[in-house]
Image (cartoon, rainbow, N blue to C red):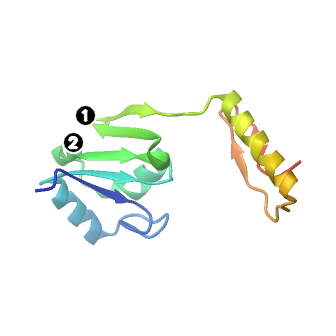
Amino acid sequence: MKKLIVFDLDGTLAESKSPLDAEMSARLHNLLGVVKVAIISGGDWPQFEKQVLSHLPHDERLVNLSILPTCGTKFFQYKGDWTKLYSEDFTADEKKKITNSLERALGIAGFTVEKVWETKLKTGEAKSLSPR
């Protein structure tokens, strides 16, 4: 018998950015009664709360569920409450170096950005991801 089953969230357990439907919630809850389950997604913790956890019964079966947000760079397990076991976060300097390198590469390649996406840094400052 399998000891762990791992699922991607969006497009597998639920439509992209949508909550688990009633049937999937029931099936996942039943599965948690017999085996450990891990769910991975590119979304962060709030997305899991909204899409998955708010649609599952809050009972003892949650100890068999592991949540891996942001492509597995964070790991949460239920121990009476959700506990973060690790979080592989970039430092501010690492983020700056990566962003600057990407912007230089885009400039060298002559790539023209049609839509600018931004990310909020922990300081609340918006960082443009388009070439300067």
Residue at 85% x, 51% y: name it: 131
Q: Residue 79: give x, y in percent of width and height.
A: 25, 34
Q: Is residue 110 above or below residue 11?
A: above
Q: Is residue 101 left or right of residue 65?
A: right
Q: Amino acid at mark 2?
A: Val
Characterize the local packing of mark 1: few (<14), some (14-19) or many (20 or more) Cα atoms within 10 angstroms: few
Q: Residue 82: give x, y in percent of width and height.
A: 33, 37
Residue at 79% x, 57% y: name it: 116
Residue located beneath label 2 in the image: 63
Q: Amino acid at mark 1?
A: Lys
Residue located beneath label 1 in the image: 79
Residue 49 showing in the rendered view: yes
Q: Residue 40: give x, y in percent of width and height.
A: 40, 52
Q: Is residue 72 above or below residue 41?
A: above
Q: Residue furthest front?
A: 108
Q: Residue 97: give x, y in percent of width and height.
A: 73, 34
Q: Is residue 119 left or right of residue 110?
A: left
